[in-house]
Image (cartoon, helix red, strand yellow):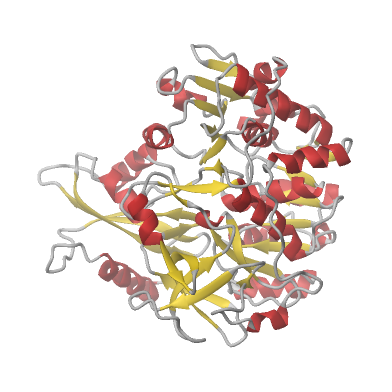
Amino acid sequence: MSDAGASPRHFSFWPKGRPKEFPVPQTNLAHNLATSAARFPDQAAIVYYDTPISYRRLWDEVEALAGYLVNRAGVRRGDRVLLYMQNSPQFVIAYYAILRANAVVVPLNPMLVGEELAVYLEDSGATVAITGQELAPRLRALVPAPLKHAIVAAYSDYLETPTDLDLPPAVAAPRAAVEGEGFVTFSAAVAAGERPGPMTAGGDDMALLPYTSGTTGRPKGCVHTHRSIQTTAFATPMWGGAMMPGRRVMSVLPYFHVTGMTGDMNATLLCGSTIVMMTRWDPAVVLKLIERYRCTSMTAISTMIVDLLAHPAYRGEAFASIMHLSGGGAPLPAAVGTELTERLGLSYMEGYGLTETIAMTHANPPDRTKLQCLGVPTFGVDSRVIDPETLRELPAGETGEILISGSQVMREYWHQPEATADAFIELDGKRFFRTGDLGYVDDEGYFFLVDRLKRMINVAGFKVWPAEVETKLFSHPAVKEACVIASTDPRIGERVKALIVPRDGVDVTPEEIIDWARAHMAVYKAPSVVEFVPSLPRSGSGKVQWRELQEDEARRQGTAGAPV
């Protein structure tokens, strides 16, 4: 964080022994894995349900898959490749193989369904996809056009050591035959033995295109370069003091999402540490793995922490090896934070970041955390609070829009120049990203989130933009009007509620709308509550007064209690 135009008061609480900023590597992110493989070839890069995978093997398979992408699938520098898969060794191999091929990773949420996939495919312009076999049927209608190639992975291919752990169905399923033009198994692609050409993409080249749903209903691709990804790959372990080989990371967050991608995958492989990986969240399995492999760190959203502490199999001794516990996405309840400190001697280090910033920009100092707090700006980050109307910088204690400037900030929104122009402003000669989040800074330089300038619902850490859900609901033949708001949930923070004006003469139930929505959009986006209303409140200009409905919901829940 630069001293110019920004208060350095939080430097008084800066993590001991850490620089205020660091030089960001200008290399392709894949160099990090290649370097760790050269340094620690026999070290386990991944332990997958008790099967160890060495750094040497991981890099060899990255090279082989990159060669297949280039020589057989025709992937060229700058091409976008869909990565549509759950956490698995194949996800890691595919991610780094795409980068090794000088191409661009387009990570997609495995919960997306066919109609949504077509939108992302069209916007990204990808012609190649790498997917899990449980998801491959959703791509069937898209291959061989517009997708020319689909590489299909069976997670069970990497279950080589007998295990007593409970396996998710998608992991336990044996490899199925892959048929049809354009389809090939992941194992066959790796076994082809192809080799790519030189690694030519570098720091300023586009490397990643993650999507964040738009406030207008159109998804927005965030253009990240190797440089922006390298920033948080290095910053995340440095901040927590965990940048060392031999560390064992209990990996529970999804890799398609920037937090899991950065903190669990990229940062761990950069350090030559070990990812103790699982495909689906299961608190009983997590407790076993932490104890079995003496895991030293874990990043988890607050609902996961609550799940672990409340699980019948929970024992405090299982956490004895954990030295670093962090998270974000939703605030940790104060009572749970106190329990962690008093029972386990652990501080939950909350942080803050966005898809547009490839995860962390703010974090609590490890030795001086504050609960339900975003933390302080990290290495080289200049963050401020402004009046969103006048753009005037606000003093401590006053609520305004949070701005961020730093090398981890995306370059632009993919092919959306107007959205890009709206998202950035210049202050003191710096380019700042407008987060759309309302917050304030306290007298010690710690940031706190108050509200959202833009409409957004936080479902267990997943962002849901109401306009996108409304757009989909309007395509239902029984829906005349719809307004989507947040409904408080004591476990996952918020859930999606739809207020719907049905068409005259149409007989439909809320349950039918919910079932239809789950079939047409990712389950976390689909409304879990539907309420039919005779009309929606509108302003003089005809706009639906969503904030009025949101406030009515808050008052109702304040009176009647949280929904169950």
| Viewer-proximal residue among 538 and 99 | 99
Q: Residue 177 occupies which quadrant of the picture?
A: top right
How far across and how far down the image is residue 381, in percent? 60, 68
Which quadrant does the C terminus fall into? bottom left
Name the residue rendered at 89%, 35% in the picture: 42
Name the residue rendered at 57%, 33% in the picture: 103
Q: Is residue 18 above or below residue 421?
A: below
How far across and how far down the image is residue 126, in percent? 46, 30
Q: Is residue 207 left or right of residue 65?
A: left
| Viewer-proximal residue among 104 and 482 | 104
Q: Is residue 307 above or below residue 427?
A: above
Which quadrant does the N terminus fall into? bottom right
Name the residue rendered at 53%, 11% in the picture: 179
Q: Is residue 553 above or below residue 233?
A: below
Residue 288 at least partly seen: no
Q: Residue 486 occupies which quadrant of the picture?
A: bottom left
| Viewer-proximal residue among 327 and 246 | 246
Report the label total.
0
How far across and how far down the image is residue 174, in percent? 66, 21
Q: Residue 405 occupies which quadrant of the picture?
A: bottom right
Q: Is residue 170 left or right of residue 40?
A: left
Residue 548 at least partly seen: yes
Q: Is residue 20 left or right of residue 53?
A: left
Q: Is residue 439 above or below residue 184?
A: below
